[in-house]
Image (cartoon, rainbow, N blue to C red):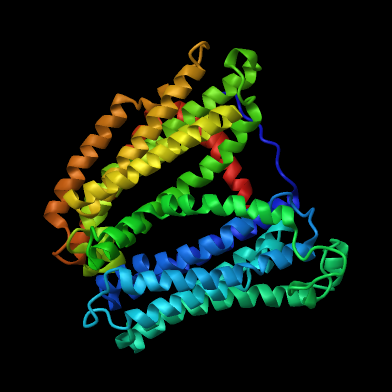
Amino acid sequence: MLQPTITPCGSSARARNRGGRRRGVMFRVLTFLLNAFTLRFVSKELIGVVNVRLTLLYSTLVFLSREAFRRACLSGGTDHNWRQVINLLWLTLPLGVLWASLLVCVWLWLLEVPDPLTIPHYGPAVGLFALAALQELLAEPLWVLAQAHMFVRLKVVAESLAMVAKCVLTVVLVVSAPQWGLYIFSAAQLVYTGFLVLCYFVYFLHFLGSGEANRKYFPLQRVADLLPSSVEGEPVIDWTLARLTWSFFKQSFLKQILTEGERYVMTFLNVLSFGEQGVYDIVNNLGSMVARFIFLPIEESFYVFFAKVLERGRDVRQQKQEEVAIAAEVLECLLKLVLVIGLIITVFGYAYSHLALDIYGGSLLSSGAGPSLLRCYSSYVLLLAINGITECFVFAAMSKEEVDRYNLVMLALSISFLLLSYMLTWWAGGIGFILANCLNMGLRILHSLFYIHRYFLSSQWTPLLGLRPSPLLLLALALSAVLTALSEGVFCCDGGWLLRLVHIAVGAGCLLGVLVTVLLTETKLVQFVRTQLLPRYGKKHT
């Protein structure tokens, strides 16, 4: 097999990224376990109000207050007058106060208010979540400074410590004072943003004026330089960046609506009850973990590979044929890899969704619509996996003009997704959101498949064959689906842990059979994983 070669980045950057990735995974696992413990002490209605309604208020306020400033001030790297940039960034705070005043009024008086007997303290919680957002804006100048000067470790450590502090406080309060309700999560959110701000300020207090800062030629020398100030004879802010900020600000509304589309539909159109919102949000977060931990690293790594091997916007016949051959072979193997993983998740997700939710959240998640939602999401993961790889290739091969046109297609698909979500949710409840996501993702996959087919049409390579699994593998998956479904009906999940372990053993045996089938029938894929993926990710974690 032809083997792709990717030029590594600098060793110090790799070390920082490896350390940050390890800490990030460790803290995610810890917060995952703490959240699982918390679910046993709260109602799904409370989770719905916190995870959807109040979190949407927080994310909307923070995004509209700072996103445009971030994008403008981080453009051009470190080549700025940083005194003027700091002055501009401090405008996020008064802007945040204005947005908070408007959004708090909407959340209190225009949206449906939860029943105070079931979910008390809603009004104060809205104010406290808005205050937490404003508190986070205090660190915005420091965050931009850290990002512009590649302080990767600071961001990872600050966010991880803040998240652990938030989860620990939540666990302590839900166990010792569950009657506080929304006050618990409001206090935890304030602690989270407070830790973020504290970490950034403590770091820069020690860094500014130090020998390390001098060696790096850091543009600021004193703590006072972090505060708004002016110098006689020069503008208070960089007006070029201010105009760029305004341009980004006009785009931020649509971007936020498309990013948080599901939560806006749930919040403003009342298509789900608070309890249904809570269960859907938890299932959505659980299901998306697979995409974040397995598929996203593969997509990011091989986007860089395709972008280096292929010449953007050029016909396949006008490129170096050796590199096109490598790209086609790698694309075929990647498609086969994510297809196999996605099919395994879909097959085993059906029979083990109920058990997984019962272990993670108890009867709060395993009763009602939770298992059905996770079963549907398991199928959606297959589409997520295929779309990630196909778009990874397409975005690396497209010309700038093609990317601009595709962005318009994406905009139309996103708007249609919001409309579909509204209609399908009225019909099928929370499952309607997943169906809308599946339809949206299916259309994106079709667009990418057509592009890849046209791209290689005049060549000898057919990488889309990677989407054709072997018949024996399909047979093994079909048998596994039948056996695990029967096992769930007989052994799971009300007969105690002994029968649950039998159900798990049946699944383990079926999974082993599927993996053996993959080893015997998908030899090209096995060789690709052994020679390409494992060495690459082994180096990242060594």
Give the image quarter of residue 272.
bottom left
Q: Nearer the viewer, residue 304 or 105?
A: 105
Tell me the residue at 59%/23% (across/down): 326
On the question of residue 440 being in view, the answer is yes
Q: Quadrant of residue 160?
A: bottom right
Residue occupying the point 50% across, 71% down: 163
Nearer to us in this view, 13 or 217: 217
Above or below — where is 402 with respect to 73? above
Q: Position of residue 274 (x, y in %)?
A: 25, 67
Number of marks:
0
In percent of width and height, residue 350 lies at 23, 48
User: Is any atom of residue 506 visible in this view?
Assistant: no
| Quadrant that contains the N terminus | top right
Quadrant of the rendered image containing residue 491? bottom left
Q: State the image coordinates of residue 69 (x, y, percent, origin top left).
A: 63, 59
- Compared with 358, 190 (above or below) is below
Residue 408, compared with residue 468, is above or below; it is: below
Out of 103 and 6, give the one closest to the viewer: 103
Q: Residue at x 80, y 59 (%)?
A: 81
Residue 32 drawn at (x, y percent): 42, 66
**For residue 264, side relative to residue 389 (left or right):** left
Residue occupying image coordinates x 57% and y 77%? 195
